[in-house]
């Protein structure tokens, strides 16, 4: 029963020692020994998860603590006994297939199903499994069952992160024009001054996240993850509408600040995953959140461009004075509606992941936590190994976000000036491509990669690819093949897709091994990430404005070169990073 207990606890989260279990095999005799292991485990999981078992199926096989099905003796006699009882399908260990020697009269009466792992047994045995279980790979190459509650939780977390990314990326196509309109209405017409206010509005959102993220992470350690996630969704739903209705720069800045403050909950979503996941599930599930990042980065700018100025671009019912007065409200309404849907799903379907007995007992009020934001980050930066991972992530994000503002500035430059001469629509398509690549990598490729390579090695590779891809962008001129430019974009999209989940997984492992509160650690990292998203765009804006008309070392290439230097420093820091062997060995997927 030891192996059965371990496997059942891993798959369902329930300890069978807490239950009075009785498994009966009617009409049989001498059912004992290892050959009944998979039958016992299947029966218990069926009861716990409320999924019936196919009664026209027999099974035999020994079970290891890792969920592998091992060979047993007397397999031929057991198959014949099942056929004589009217059973049409029999599950046996794959390693027993060469041992099967049954009477010819039985061969046409039975289907023999060879399996290597318990998940394959459950796939054959459980009725209605498509609705009740989800297969996810583990480090052995087999699979485990994700309980229905965790399946719905991961779906809602995916939506939470997607909404957060939409709040950040949906404004990319129209923000410059929106701020220009507001600035012009207030008498600010100089191009440099206008671009300055664009940078302020962009930085405001990240500044709010920088302040709120560690606080929300700490609060979630005290009161649980669910209420904090719901607060962020409610804030996004409200303040995005206010932003779309903004009639002044002050109103726009306040709306973006409050939306950013509520949306500092990605750290809480990552802590939620850490709460409900085994070590071998963390990396794959972090990859699912990374896929939400990629999807948000793909559809956010695309929708922001398509839905902007609907009176002119869409017409029909939108061809009214109201939509002419508020040309950027529609994409904001879309983001708000997404947040409202996610909020309702969280309210009715998202269980709390942090038990009361595991919560922090800090007596500090949320107000006092505001003043402790920098202190919290400083304390995390003093932790061995964790500080290195957090600093690497900070440098990576500064380099990555420097590209956000200057990418479109470069692609929209006239070809004779060195740019590509692209329109807003063409820029929308390239952002969609970048996001699609991220979804493919983090939603699918990351799992087989982490089963084959170490997390540290993948993080290094992701940093190299991202840095080279971004630093190379301005060297793809209009007279060169566009395949070269798209290759550069694919490189940094793939690199980012590999880096993000592996770095988050290594930080999770380091936090658990050190006995630190995961919400606080993730909160500090996301807070520093928000700081990087402030520094990156502002730094690139200053460098771009000073060098865009220059030549030699000081030209429009300079901003991308400086971005590459940040990735180089991050790479050098990773070379001295020490990771636990356990993290490397167990990070096999979800």
Image (cartoon, rainbow, N blue to C red):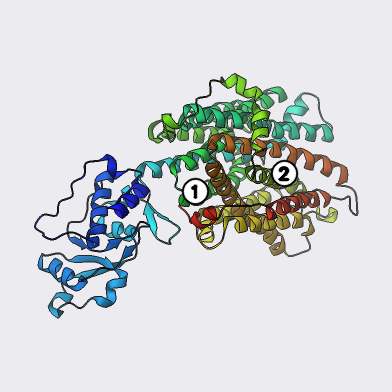
Residue that carries the numbered disc 1 in the rendered image: 282
Q: Describe the element under mark 2 as helix, strand or loop.
A: helix
Q: Residues within 10 Å of mark 1 (few under 14, many from 20)?
A: many
Residue 324 in which image quadrant: top right
Residue 477 visible here: no
The answer to whether marks 1 and 2 mark residues whose Cβ atoms lie closer than 8 Å is no
Q: Describe the element under mark 1 as helix, strand or loop.
A: helix
Q: Nearer the viewer, residue 42 or 126?
A: 42
Whole-percent x, y for residue 82 in the image:
15, 66
Which residue extends farthest left?
27
Q: Determine which of the numbered discs, if any, sits on residue 398 in the image.
A: 2
**C-alpha separation, residue under disc 1 versus residue under disc 2:** 25 Å
Q: Nearer the viewer, residue 235 or 140?
A: 140
Residue 522 in which image quadrant: top right
Whole-percent x, y for residue 306 in the image:
60, 43
Q: Residues within 10 Å of mark 2 (few under 14, many from 20)?
A: many
Q: Measuring 14% from the left and 78% from the top, which residue is drawn there?
A: 103
In the image, 202: left or right of 436?
right
């Amino acid at each position: 029963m030891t192996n059965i207990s371990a496997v059942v606890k891993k798959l369902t989260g329930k300890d069978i020692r807490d239950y009075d279990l009785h498994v009966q095999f009617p009409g049989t005799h001498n059912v004992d020994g290892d050959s009944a292991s998979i039958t016992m485990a299947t029966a218990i999981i069926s009861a716990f998860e409320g999924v019936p078992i196919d009664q026209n199926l027999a099974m035999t096989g020994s079970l290891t603590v890792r969920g592998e099905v091992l060979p047993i003796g007397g397999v031929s006699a057991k198959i014949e006994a099942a056929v004589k009882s009217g059973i049409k399908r029999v599950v046996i260990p794959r390693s027993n297939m060469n041992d099967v020697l049954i009477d010819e009269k039985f061969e046409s009466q039975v289907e023999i199903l060879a399996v290597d792992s318990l998940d394959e047994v459950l796939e054959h045995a459980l009725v209605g499994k498509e609705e009740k279980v989800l297969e996810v790979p583990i480090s052995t190459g087999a699979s485990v069952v994700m309980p229905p509650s965790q399946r719905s939780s991961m779906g809602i977390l995916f939506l939470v992160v997607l909404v957060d990314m939409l709040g950040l990326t949906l404004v990319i196509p129209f923000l410059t024009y929106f701020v220009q309109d507001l600035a012009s209405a207030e008498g600010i017409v100089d191009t440099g001054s206008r671009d300055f206010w664009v940078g302020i509005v962009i930085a405001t959102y990240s500044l709010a996240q920088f302040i709120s993220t560690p606080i929300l992470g700490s609060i979630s350690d005290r009161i649980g993850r669910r209420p904090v996630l719901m607060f962020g969704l409610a804030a996004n739903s409200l303040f995005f509408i206010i932003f779309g209705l903004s009639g002044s720069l002050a109103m726009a800045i306040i709306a973006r600040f409050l939306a950013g403050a509520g949306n500092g909950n990605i750290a809480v979503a990552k802590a939620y995953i850490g709460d409900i996941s085994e070590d071998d599930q963390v990396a794959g599930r972090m990859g699912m959140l990374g896929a939400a990042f990629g999807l948000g980065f793909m559809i956010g700018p695309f929708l922001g461009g398509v839905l902007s100025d609907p009176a002119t671009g869409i017409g029909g019912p939108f061809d009214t004075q109201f939509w002419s007065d508020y040309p950027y409200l529609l994409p904001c309404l879309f983001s708000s509606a997404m947040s409202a849907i996610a909020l309702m799903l969280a309210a009715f379907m998202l269980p709390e992941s942090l038990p009361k007995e595991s919560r922090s007992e800090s007596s500090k009020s949320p107000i006092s936590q505001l003043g402790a934001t920098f202190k919290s980050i400083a304390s995390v930066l003093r932790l061995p190994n964790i500080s290195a991972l957090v600093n690497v992530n900070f440098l990576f994000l500064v380099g990555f976000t420097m590209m956000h503002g200057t990418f479109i500035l470069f692609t929209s430059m006239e070809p004779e000036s060195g740019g590509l001469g692209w329109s807003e629509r063409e820029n929308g398509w390239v952002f969609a491509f970048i996001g699609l690549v991220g979804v493919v990598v983090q939603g699918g490729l990351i799992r087989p990669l982490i089963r084959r390579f170490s997390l540290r090695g993948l993080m290094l590779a992701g940093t190299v690819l991202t840095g080279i891809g971004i630093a190379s962008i301005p060297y793809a001129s209009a007279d060169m093949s566009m395949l070269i430019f798209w290759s550069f974009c694919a490189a940094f999209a793939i690199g980012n897709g590999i880096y993000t989940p592996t770095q988050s997984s290594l930080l999770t492992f380091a936090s658990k091994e050190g006995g630190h509160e995961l919400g606080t650690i993730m909160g500090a990292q996301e807070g520093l990430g928000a700081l990087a998203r402030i520094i990156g765009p502002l730094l690139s804006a200053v460098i771009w404005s000073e060098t865009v008309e220059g030549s030699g070392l000081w030209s429009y290439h300079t901003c991308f070169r400086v971005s590459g230097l940040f990735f180089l420093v991050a790479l050098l820091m990773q070379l001295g990073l020490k990771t636990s062997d356990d993290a490397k060995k167990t990070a096999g997927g979800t």
